[in-house]
Every structure is written in C-alpha cells, then in structure tokens.
Amino acid sequence: MKKHFISGVLIALISISVPVFSQTLDRIVAIIEDDVILDGELQAEVDVIAQRIKASNAVVPPSYILRKQVLEKLIIEKLQRQLAERSGIALNDEMLASAAADIARRNNMTPAEFRVELGKQSISYRSFLENLRNEVIINQLRGREIGSRVNVSDREVEHFLETESKLGGEATQYHLGHILVAIPEGASSSVIQKAKQKAEEIIQDLRGGRDFVQVAMSRSDSSEALTGGDLGWRSINQVPTLFVDEVGDLKQGDVSDPIRSPSGFHVIKMLELKGGDQQHIVTKTHVRHILIKTNELIDDDEAKKRLNNLKRRIADGDSFDALARAHSDDKGSALNGGSLDWVAPGALVPEFEKAMNALAIDEISKPVQTQFGWHLIQVLGRKQQDDSEDYKKEQVREAIRKRKIEEETELWLRRLRDEAYVEVFHDRL
C-alpha cells in the first residue's frame, strides 16, 4: 500500500530532486509576468510526468510534445502562485507540517515513517514540502476565488434527479475521456473557426482509430491533458452540464461532435459504461446528553466535576431526563430530557460521535469535551436504516458543486492565462 501511495499520490506533488541550475548556462524557456521558467526546471518536471505516464502503462509522447504540455502546466502554476502572493495567501511552517502529517495519517503512517518512505523512493523531503506548500496555497486561492462563489439550489438537485431518471438512473456510471481545443477570450471569428476545424480533425482521427490517450496528451489544451484526458468514472450528476445531453446519446467507444463552450471546443469519448448499486444503509443512534459549558466561573475541571456528580446520581437512581432538563446548558435538547433524537453518521461533531459510537446501549460516558463544552452522553438505541433517497440528494448536491467548481476553474485559469504577460521561447523546446 505504501508503494501504491507513493506512485499514485506523491508523484503528483513531488518534483524529483534535480538541481535547477545543473547546467552551466540554464536557458530561459518562458517569461511569466516577473518570473521565468528555466530549461532545467522544465526538464525536471518533464521527467516526473514521464515517470507517471510510464507507471500508468501508457506510451510517453515525443519529447517536444511533452515539453510543450508540461511547460503550459508550469505557466499556469506560476500564475496562480503569483496571484496568491499578491493576495497575501501564505502557509507558515507549522501549517505545512500539519498538512504533511495529514497526508501521512491518511496513508496509515506516522510522519517519521512517511519521511523514511520518501527516502526509500529517492524523494527529497524538502522538495516534497515545497511542492506541498505550493499545492495547498493554490487550493486556498481557488477556494477563495471560485469555491466561495459556488452554490447549489434545491431546484438544481431536483432537476438532476429528473435528468438521471431519464438517462437510466445514477446506477449508470460513465468513464469519459475529454479533449479541449481552447479559444482565448475575445477571439475573432477566424480564430474560432480555426479551433473548430482542429476539433473536427481530432474527432476524425479518433473515429478513425487513433489512440485517445495519445491524442489527448499531444493535442488537448485541458488541464487533464497529461493524464490522457481521463475524467474518470462519473454518474450523470457528476458529468459537466455541457456534456450531459451528449453523454446520454453516446455508446461505449463513441466520440461526440464538437461541443462549444466559452473555453473552446470540447470532444468527449465514452470509454466505458457500467451499472452500480445505489442502496445506502446507515446506522442511526438514539442519543441524549447533558452539556456543561465552560466560562469565567466554570473551568474544565469544574465542568467535569459537575458531570461526574450527575453521573453518580443517575447510577443511584435519579432520572437522566430530569437532570438534563434541570442542568444541561443545551437548552434546545434540555426541553426534551437531553434527547438529540436519532442521528445519522456525520451529524455531530467528531469528538462527540467518537465517544457515542464507543458506548453500548444504555451506557453513559465519562465527561467528553467538544468545542461546545463538556458532555455526559447516553446511547438509548441503534438501528439500521435505508437513507438512500436523502443520501442520493446529498451526493447529487456535492457532485453538482464539484462539477460547477471544475467548470469555473477551467474558465478562471484560461482567463488568468489570457490576461497575463507570457512569452514562450519555442525554439528552446
């Protein structure tokens, strides 16, 4: 699992540890506003991308094509970092260490084990941290510039549920390939026509049997070009709005006609189709609690002392219901004897839920601290429930939001690129 993690996740974050100034004269291959990309920097990233492509058992494109695509990737990254710096977005060493620890924890490693594993893969920990810093900063920038503006209405959710029903339901999963022929903002009619012609030529090549991955790597302007244009498996509610009608008409192996958007012309290929199971069973817990909040007069020790006294009274025969009504600082639940009713996973803060899940039915916890104060928790029952309908709605809402962010990000990056001063020395590629 660790090796899989290194090849599948880290390779997307890390640049191999090749000194940028390894040549006597490291030529400038591009100027981006007040920054530059050097040939050594470009080649180091090309080597990483080539390694990733080989690891996926795909054919590495010719050097000049790969260098051109990777250069565009670096340009977009530098423009984002420049904007983040101008916007005051930064990541201090403590936050960076926390982000690295999170990655280690998600892969069942301690930070020390994680660092050792990087060393086994000949990956510089300093290079990893620097690339992680850039990744986190760019994500924060995108969250501020795009994510904060994206909302999903109930009507949008209902509309997608209606659409998926017409197209066979969410049980159908689509594995899609995507190629973009980009058009700059404010492009002339001749530029637009030339882009459309290029898209039609690509479609003709694909329908004639050309390998989609190779065509995407060499000719697509999309951000996923270097992964062969692979959009992965998606249910209909995860498919970009622009492509929904086309996807419903495509059979496995089919290639769409050109699809126009503000970004340019899109080409979609239906790589695979499959069904899926949508039943979602959750364990709901009937739980009640007594909350003691801390303040200037009640510190942590006093709050725990009060709850332990209440726990002893309950053990001696006093009613949890009555004590919650009299002593709980959660006035909403206190009116119901401390009851929070039946709760689904994820409905409560993690510390409370973890303690609740560890309790047997009728068992009362020791005092548990959360952001709200200190709690005495009792589990009254558990039941299995099929919440497929509610779960599907939440999945649809999140999928629509993700799709909107992807669409807005594509437009935002294209605009950022078009409005920046960028000079590429093509003769050095």
Image (spheres, grey):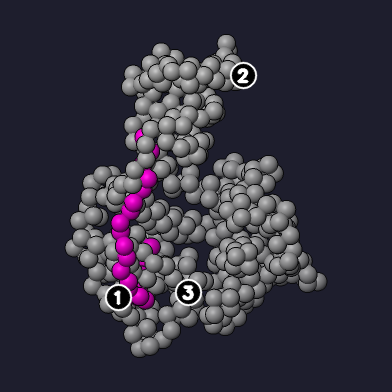
Other-residue count near label 2 (Cα within 10 Å), few / some / many at <14 / 14–19 / ≥20: few
From the image, tell me which residue sits under label 2: 301
* Three-letter amino acid code at the position of disc 3: Gly
* Lower sequence index among marks 2 and 1: 1
- Secondary-structure class at tag 2: helix
From the image, tell me which residue sits under label 1: 256
Image location (x, y in percent) of residue 62: 57, 83
Other-residue count near label 1 (Cα within 10 Å), few / some / many at <14 / 14–19 / ≥20: some
Residue 196, picture quadrant? bottom left
Per the image, is 174 magenta?
no
Q: Is residue 97 above or below residue 203?
A: above
* Disc 2 and disc 3 in contact, CB within 8 angstroms: no
Real-space CA distance between mark 2 and mark 1, rounded to the nearest whole angstrom = 66 Å
Which marked residue is nearer to the observer: mark 2 or mark 1? 2
Image location (x, y in percent) of residue 134: 61, 53
**Residue sitting nearer the eye, 287 or 189:** 287
Per the image, is 270 magenta?
yes
- Quarter occupied by the C terminus: bottom right
Other-residue count near label 3 (Cα within 10 Å), few / some / many at <14 / 14–19 / ≥20: many
What's the residue at 50%, 71% (across, down)?
227
From the image, tell me which residue sits under label 3: 228
Residue 32 is left or right of residue 208, and the answer is: right
* Three-letter amino acid code at the position of disc 1: Ser
Q: Magenta part of the protein: which range?
A: 263-286
Image location (x, y in percent) of residue 302: 59, 16
What's the residue at 31%, 47% (across, down)?
385
- Whether residue 408 appears in this view of the structure is no
